[in-house]
């Protein structure tokens, strides 16, 4: 596998992110055009279904990401307890975005980076990821 870094860690599934999203957007536009040209009960149902499919597309991605964030929170809580016991009392101060940002930090740099995140009140997960020097790859992300 290609070594992971901030520059290439985002995960895209082409059939889902590009093909399916394009099909669903086209379907929504197509049904709206048909409703505008020839209003009918069937065309209203078609638009409603196209909207429902678009909503499903969003939540089919959102729900697993929320679960993944909960797992990350648990994993990073355990790592911080093990690697920086002095921070265990401050675990409740971390936000989900902070945990997500810290997850890519190596064990060696996690304690110092976690302290910095809390002390400087860094809240942007992307900004935290950019501070990571030794990237800890994660190839099992949702």
Image (cartoon, rainbow, N blue to C red):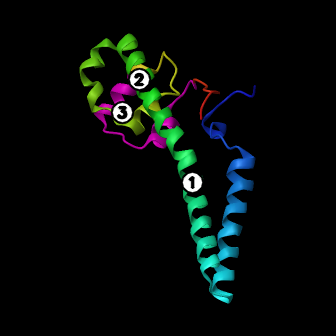
**Mark 2 lies on residue:** 74
Which residue lies at the image location 64% right of the left edge and 71% below the top edge? 46
Q: Position of residue 5 (x, y in %)?
A: 63, 32
Circle nearer the viewer, 1 or 2: 1
Front residue of this view, candidates 97 and 45? 45
**Mark 1 lies on residue:** 56
Residues in magenta, as a range: 112-135
Which residue lies at the image location 28% right of the left edge and 15% below the top edge? 86
Which quadrant: the C terminus? Answer: top right
Q: Quadrant of residue 37?
A: bottom right
Q: Earlier in the sequence, mark 1 or mark 2?
A: 1
Front residue of this view, candidates 75 and 22? 22
Which quadrant: the N terminus? Answer: top right
Q: Quadrant of residue 135?
A: top right
Circle nearer the viewer, 3 or 1: 1
Position of residue 90 relative to residue 25, above or below, is above
Number of numbered callouts drawn: 3
Circle nearer the viewer, 2 or 3: 2
Label 1 element class: helix
| Circle 3 Cα neighbour tier, 10 Å, few/some/many (<14 / 14–19 / ≥20) | many
**Mark 3 lies on residue:** 117
Q: Is residue 52 magenta?
A: no
Label 2 element class: helix
Which residue lies at the image location 46% right of the left edge and 39% below the top edge? 66
| Circle 2 Cα neighbour tier, 10 Å, few/some/many (<14 / 14–19 / ≥20) | few
Query: Gap in Å between the C-alphas at discs 2 and 3?
Result: 18 Å
Q: Position of residue 34 (x, y in %)?
A: 69, 81
Query: Gap in Å between the C-alphas at discs 3 and 1?
Result: 35 Å
């Amino acid at each position: 596998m290609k070594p992971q870094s901030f520059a290439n860690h985002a995960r895209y599934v082409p059939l889902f992110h590009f093909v399916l999203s394009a099909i669903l957007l086209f379907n929504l536009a197509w049904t709206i055009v048909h409703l505008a040209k020839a209003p009918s009960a069937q065309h209203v149902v078609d638009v409603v279904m196209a909207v429902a499919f678009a909503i499903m597309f969003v939540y089919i991605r959102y729900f697993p990401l929320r679960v993944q964030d909960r797992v990350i929170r648990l994993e990073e809580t355990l790592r911080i307890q093990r690697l920086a016991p002095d921070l265990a009392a401050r675990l409740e101060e971390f936000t989900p975005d902070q945990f997500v940002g810290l997850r890519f930090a190596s064990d060696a740099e996690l304690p110092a980076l976690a302290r910095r995140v809390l002390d400087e009140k860094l809240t942007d997960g992307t900004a935290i990821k950019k501070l990571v020097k030794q990237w800890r790859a994660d190839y099992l992300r949702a």
